[in-house]
Each structure stands twice: as C-alpha cells, then as structure tokens.
Image (tube, helix red, strand yellow):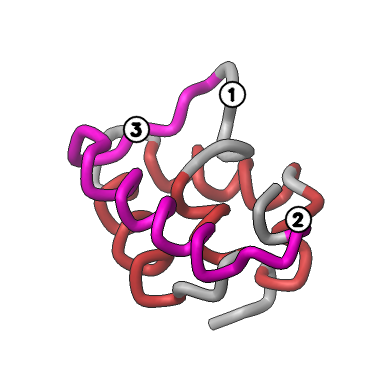
Amino acid sequence: MMRGLGRLDEACALNRAFAEIIPRPIVLSPVRGGFFSPVASSLLLENRSLALTLPGEEANRPFGRESLRVDSRTDPRMKPFRDDP
C-alpha cells in the first residue's frame, strides 16, 4: 500500500522490520498463502536479497517447495518473477 502511495523508503524499512521479527524458518500459511508473505513483499519492493533468502528457509521443510510453487503460480503479482532464474 505504501509503495502505491510513493512512500517506497518507508515501505522498505517496514518490510525489513517485519522480516526480522517473523519466526524462522518461515512457513507459508495454507489459508493466506504467499499473498501476505515477506517473500512477495520483498520482491515487490525490489529487495531481491531478502526475497531469495526466505524461500530457501521455506523449501527445507516438508512440502515447502510445493507450497512455494503453488503460491508463485496463483499470486498474480508474482507473474513478472515466474521465469526469473
């Protein structure tokens, strides 16, 4: 929301603070999916280093990779990143 208002610096600071306080390793909720995850928000805020670190934590748990695949396919905001290596 803050990104849409042109307050990118503030949005990035809040995203970093949120990423520091979430329990690790991250677990994507099957109900909320990845829509409100720090991975999606980091990608949208162009914080690629954080966005690439967090999925590695999720992928190490049972069914984590499949959860990430489903979330990336169903979240329309992630379309630009689907083919990203």
Q: What residue type is labelled 3?
A: Val
In whole angstroms, how far apart are the C-alphas of marks 3 and 2?
A: 20 Å
Residue range in magenta is 4-30
Farthest residue toward the left? Answer: 24
Q: Where does label 1 land, which residue?
A: 32
* Residue 42 screen position, x and y as percent: 49, 61
Q: Where does label 3 land, which residue?
A: 27
- Give the side of residue 46 with respect to residue 1, left or right: left
Q: Is residue 83 above or below residue 30?
A: below
- 1 and 2 marks in contact (CB < 8 Å): no
Marks 3 and 2, the one that precedes in the sequence: 3
In whole angstroms, how far apart are the C-alphas of marks 1 and 2?
A: 15 Å
Marks 3 and 1, the one that precedes in the sequence: 3
Is 7 one of the magenta-colored residues?
Answer: yes
Disc 3: CA contacts within 10 A as few (<14), some (14-19) or many (>=20): many
Q: Out of 70 and 38, give the one closest to the viewer.
A: 38
Circle 1 — which element? Answer: loop
Q: Where does label 2 land, which residue?
A: 77
| Quadrant in which residue 27 is drawn | top left
Q: What residue type is labelled 1?
A: Arg
Q: Is residue 71 above or below residue 56?
A: above
- 3 and 2 marks in contact (CB < 8 Å): no
* Residue 24 screen position, x and y as percent: 18, 39
Residue at image point 56% right, 39% down: 34
- Give the side of residue 83 with respect to residue 47, left or right: right
Q: Out of 10 and 17, give the one closest to the viewer.
A: 10
Q: Which amino acid does label 2 sit on?
A: Arg
Marks 1 and 2, the one that precedes in the sequence: 1
* Residue 80 screen position, x and y as percent: 75, 72
Residue at image point 56% right, 66% down: 43
Residue at image point 34% right, 57% down: 16
Farthest residue toward the top? Answer: 31
